[in-house]
Image (tube, rainbow, N blue to C red):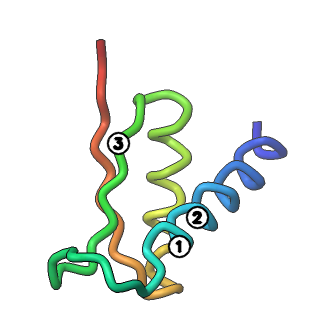
Amino acid sequence: MRKIAVPLAAAALALGLTACGAGSGGGSDDDTLVVGATAVPAGEVLDYIKKNLAEKEGLKLEVKEFTD
């Protein structure tokens, strides 16, 4: 599980940082990245990123879990 979770977490963080690149978009002044995901496994991976990686990079991450 860990062998899969770490690369998946790194990929999700890279995608999130790319999506939040500085641009001329008409976004708000709030620097929070809001990500929607299913509870398992994506939600667990994003929670790991939020707790362990995002703060180190100065990224505010909000995870919204969706269920059927």
The amino acid marked with disc number 1 is Leu
Residue at the location (30% across, 28% down)? Answer: 66
Q: Describe residue 3's horizontal placement relative to residue 14 as left or right.
A: right
Q: Is residue 44 above or below residue 60?
A: above
Q: Is residue 26 left or right of residue 9?
A: left
Side of 43 relative to 14 (left or right): left
**Callout 2: SS:** helix
From what the image shows, is residue 9 above or below residue 65? below
Percent of width and height locating residue 62? 29, 59
Query: Which residue, given by chain and number where applicable, does mark 1 sit on?
Result: 17
Q: Secondary structure at mark 1?
A: helix
Q: Foreground: 27 or 13? A: 27
User: Marks 3 and 1, how far apart in space?
Assistant: 15 Å
Say whether disc 3 or disc 1 marks the residue closer to the N-terminus: 1
Which numbered disc covers residue 13?
2
Q: Do the residues bearing badges 1 and 2 touch, measured as CB atoms within 8 Å? A: yes
- Residue 30 in percent (x, y) is at 18, 79
Q: Residue furthest right?
A: 3
Relative to the observer, which residue lies in front, 65 or 21?
21
- Mark 1–mark 2 Cα distance, whole angstroms, equals 6 Å
Q: Secondary structure at mark 3?
A: strand
Q: Is residue 46 above or below residue 31?
A: above
The percent position of residue 10, horizontal first and vertical second, equals 69, 61
- Residue bearing mark 3: 36
Q: Amino acid at mark 3?
A: Gly
